[in-house]
Amino acid sequence: MYNLAVFGNPIEHSLSPAIHAQFAQQTATQVNYTKILAPIGNFSQEAQRFVASGGDGFNITVPFKIDAFELATELTLNAKMAGAVNTIKVQEDRLIGENTDGLGLVNDLIQNLGLSLKNKKILILGAGGATQGIVLPLLQQQPSRVMIANRTASKAEKLADDFSKYGSTCGFGLDKIKSDPIDIIINATSASLDGKMPDIANGCAHGAICYDLMYGQQTPFMTWAKENNASIIADGLGMLVEQAASSFEFWTEKKPDTQAVIKNLRR
């Protein structure tokens, strides 16, 4: 029996227990997966209490991913570069921190949407924590370039520089985006949460694959992509399931069937 959990605040809306229950059934694995509401400022104590009670691993969602980064005693390369942890595996007295967000995005793009990222020009909107978690796995697929555009140009430039040793990157302001076509545009800004669309050139979406990390609703970015003749428009539900699958495999060494779960959640 694997004793697992997800920590967050709020946490009631989390789909993680339902997703992992399906993974457990598929792989004939005994799993007890619970949601834990951690008080703001008290994540570490709650997590250590869970570990002491026999926890084998746990996921971390907002706003505790940086707290989890600091709690981990070991970090994977993904976690180090992301500066945040969304998955911890307990091994004796070790807390191994991983970040599966970027893996989830890449697996959704390749396995579920049938795309190849090799030699593609990728534009990421936003330079916050969400972007920091996805750049390395994207670069590992050998795109021609990963471009990061942000309202504050210096933040995009710094992030691009941080990842430059892993592949071709560049950073600039949102106002510097040209109308030239781009292969893949990823919206990693918080604008969708506010019902807004980043102010960028329209021509870049023509024929592009447009992907919003947000899921569960038609976002302004997705509407903009449709109006500007994007070839494929997708939300982040597949990424959610795929990052959960990477966590499940990290804990159990078993690989679940994600497409069946995505189909169930879209019903």
Image: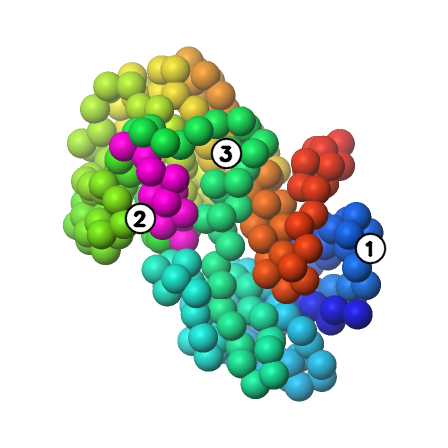
Residue position marked by numbered label 3 in the rendering: 109
* Residue at 37 percent of width and 45 percent of height: 140
The amino acid marked with disc number 2 is Ala
- Residue 134 in the magenta stretch? The answer is yes
Q: Residue 97 colored magenta?
A: no
**Residue 208 image point, x, y percent:** 39, 21
The answer to which of 156 and 182 lies nearer the viewer is: 182
Q: Is residue 115 above or below residue 10?
A: above
**Are dots 3 and 2 in contact, CB under 8 Å?**
no
Left or right? Give the position of 108 relative to 221.
right
- Mark closer to the observer (2, 1): 1
Looking at the rendered structure, the kind of residue marked 1 is Ala
Give the alpha-carbon distance from disc 2 to disc 1, as whole Å.
40 Å
Quadrant housing residue 42: bottom right
The answer to whether any part of residue 19 appears in the image is: yes
If the image is split into quadrants, where does the N terminus sit? Answer: bottom right
The magenta stretch is 133-144
Q: Residue at x 22, y 29 (%)?
A: 177
Above-or-below relation of 199 to 4:
above
Q: From this view, report whether residue 87 is shown above or below residue 236.
A: below
Please name the residue that numbered disc 2 is placed on: 127
Q: Residue at x 70, y 47 (%)?
A: 256
Question: The C terminus appears in which quarter of the rendering?
Answer: top right
Which one is nearer the viewer's eye here, 216 or 95?
95
The kind of residue on which mark 3 rests is Leu
Q: CA distance from mark 3 to mark 2?
A: 20 Å
Give 130 or 263, whichever is nearer the viewer: 263
Identify the mark at residue 28; answer none if there is no mark.
1
